[in-house]
Image (cartoon, helix red, strand yellow):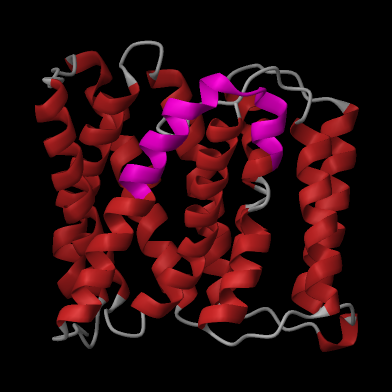
């Protein structure tokens, strides 16, 4: 049990650090190119994993449209808007905004999956919104300034919630690894022409260290950490694992301090507590935690 919690904590640290990693990568690669390259290495990893497990499966024509939609919205737009946003947005604030994804997912699930919305979800949403106010406005409404990058991060959050709903629908018909592989292949193919349409000018690093960092973070964040999480989640209590996953913004805050020398403010800490508290309040009644690969 202790070993499982240690591995889950490692995954949370990796995912929380991804906001800082992304901030560092967009300094050396333009967003659309970075999206394509990262998806390329993720797909290569997933193909290698599928080959190792002998797990290649075909998708029925009836599910093809849903997989295409998932690949375009939940993979390509999600990844691209994330990197575009991080060009100007603060990684800690971005992590906190994305931490509210479970709340939006609950709303979408109520609309499309007929799941029940509760008073607790409403109260949790209000608490989380108060937290976002403290983080974005720094506790002073008169100094409120919304960076345009944060608007792209909001789009990332919306597409992430859509991805969760779409994957939940598809998971009744297709296994998680197959969904993940094909949706990422679609995202990769769709992203290629946008490199030349969206990146002006095109920016690409010639340093081996930058390329190693790009490849390493792509494989570790979206491949290895996901597999470790899915392998260990079944050994622990779901509610406790869920609380662990809500620590990602705090990891982003700490990594921002270490790698980007960004100080942690009192408003960020207070906002973080409100946001995470609101998310926990909204979602803690769920009996089990969905697989991260889903």
Query: How far across and how far down the image is residue 85, in percent?
Result: 48, 72
Q: Does residue 94 appear to the left or right of 185 in the view shown?
A: right
Query: How far across and how far down the image is residue 71, in percent?
Result: 29, 41
Q: Residue at x 56, y 41 (%)?
A: 6
Q: Does residue 210 appear to the left or right of 157 in the view shown?
A: left
Vertical placement of residue 241 versus 246, above or below: above
| Residue 236 located within the stretch drawn in magenta | yes
Magenta span of residues: 222-243
Which picture quadrant has residue 114? top right
Query: How far across and how far down the image is residue 231, in percent?
Result: 42, 27
Query: How far across and how far down the image is residue 123, in percent?
Result: 90, 40
Q: Provide the major secondary structure of the magenta segment.
A: helix
| Residue 194 located within the stretch drawn in magenta | no
Instruction: Say if residue 166 shows up in the picture.
Output: no
Q: Residue at x 18, y 82 (%)?
A: 204
Vertical placement of residue 9 versus 89, above or below: above
Q: How many marks?
A: 0
Q: Does residue 124 appear to the left or right of 153 in the view shown?
A: right
Q: Looking at the rendering, in which quadrant would you find the N terminus?
A: top right
Q: Residue at x 41, y 70 (%)?
A: 22
Q: Which one is nearer the viewer's eye here, 49 or 90? A: 49
Question: Residue at the top extreme?
Answer: 173
């Amino acid at each position: 049990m202790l070993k499982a919690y240690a591995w889950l904590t490692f995954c949370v640290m990796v995912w929380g650090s991804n906001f800082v990693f992304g901030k560092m990568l967009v300094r050396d690669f333009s967003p659309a190119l970075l999206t394509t390259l990262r998806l390329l290495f993720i797909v290569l990893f997933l193909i290698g994993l599928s080959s190792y497990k002998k797990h290649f499966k075909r998708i029925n024509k009836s599910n093809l449209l849903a997989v295409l939609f998932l690949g375009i919205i939940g993979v390509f737009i999600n990844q691209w808007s994330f990197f575009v946003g991080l060009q100007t947005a603060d990684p800690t604030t971005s992590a906190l905004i994305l931490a509210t994804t479970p709340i939006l997912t609950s709303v979408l699930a109520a609309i499309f999956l007929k799941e029940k919305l509760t008073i607790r979800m409403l109260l949790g949403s209000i608490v989380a919104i108060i937290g976002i106010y403290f983080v974005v406005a720094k506790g002073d409404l008169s100094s409120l300034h919304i960076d345009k990058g944060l608007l792209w991060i909001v789009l990332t959050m919306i597409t992430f919630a859509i991805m969760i709903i779409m994957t939940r629908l598809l998971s009744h018909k297709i296994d998680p690894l197959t969904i993940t592989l094909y949706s990422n292949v679609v995202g990769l193919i769709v992203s290629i022409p946008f490199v030349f349409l969206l990146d002006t000018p095109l920016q690409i690093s010639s340093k081996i260290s930058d390329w190693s960092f790009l490849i390493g973070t792509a494989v570790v964040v979206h491949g290895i950490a996901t597999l470790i999480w899915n392998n260990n989640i079944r050994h622990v209590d779901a509610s406790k694992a869920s609380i662990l996953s809500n620590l990602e913004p705090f990891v982003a805050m700490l990594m921002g301090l270490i790698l980007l020398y960004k100080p942690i403010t009192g408003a960020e800490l207070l906002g973080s507590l409100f946001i995470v508290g609101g998310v926990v309040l909204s979602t803690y009644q769920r009996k089990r935690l969905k697989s991260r690969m889903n």
